[in-house]
Image: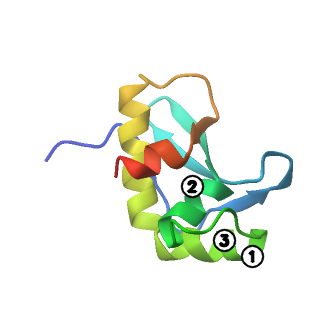
Amino acid sequence: MVKSSVRFERGDGYWVAERDSIGFTGTTDFGPVEFLITSEALAEMLNPELEGIDPETAVEVLIEYESDIHRIAQREFVQRLGGEPPILLTTSDVALA
């Protein structure tokens, strides 16, 4: 079985107020990689009609869609060849899922 380039632990998301995003950490063979997913992207996953969500709802959406978010984060990490952390996931990344 092939090992993923970046691996995630469930339940490690945290609110980042200054970025209006949820932060979470992935682990690679070279160490940790920080990711952010915007509240707008989380709202898109919950209901495309929403324009935004509050921090508490954002955390709830992360928990509910965590597997999908980790899959999107892994795809973006590979497409961006790592890139400068934190890797920001937006509504356009979620729409491609």
Labels 1, 2: front one: 2
Disc sitting over residue 41 in the figure: 2
Q: Do the residues under discs 3 and 2 have CB atoms within 8 angstroms? A: no
Distance of mark 3 from mark 1, alpha carbons? 5 Å
Above or below, 63 against 77 in this view is: below
Write down the quadrant of residue 42 in the picture: bottom right
Write down the quadrant of residue 58 in the picture: bottom right
Residue 67, percent from left and from top: 40, 65
Disc sitting over residue 56 in the figure: 1
Distance of mark 3 from mark 2, alpha carbons? 12 Å
Is residue 52 shown left or right of residue 65? Answer: right
* Residue at 59% in and 65% down: 43
* Residue at 53% in and 48% down: 91
Is residue 55 shown left or right of residue 73? Answer: right
* Residue at 64% in and 62% down: 13
The residue that disc 3 covers is: 59
Give the residue furthest to the left.
1
Display colour scheme: rainbow
Give the residue furthest to the front.
49
Is residue 20 shown left or right of residue 81? Answer: right
Residue 8, percent from left and from top: 46, 54
The amino acid pointed to by label 1 is Glu
Q: SS of the residue at dot 1? A: helix
* Residue at 78% in and 46% down: 19
The amino acid pointed to by label 2 is Ala
The amino acid pointed to by label 3 is Val
Q: Is residue 35 visible?
A: yes
- Between 50 and 83, the one lying in front of the other is 50
Distance of mark 1 from mark 2, alpha carbons? 15 Å
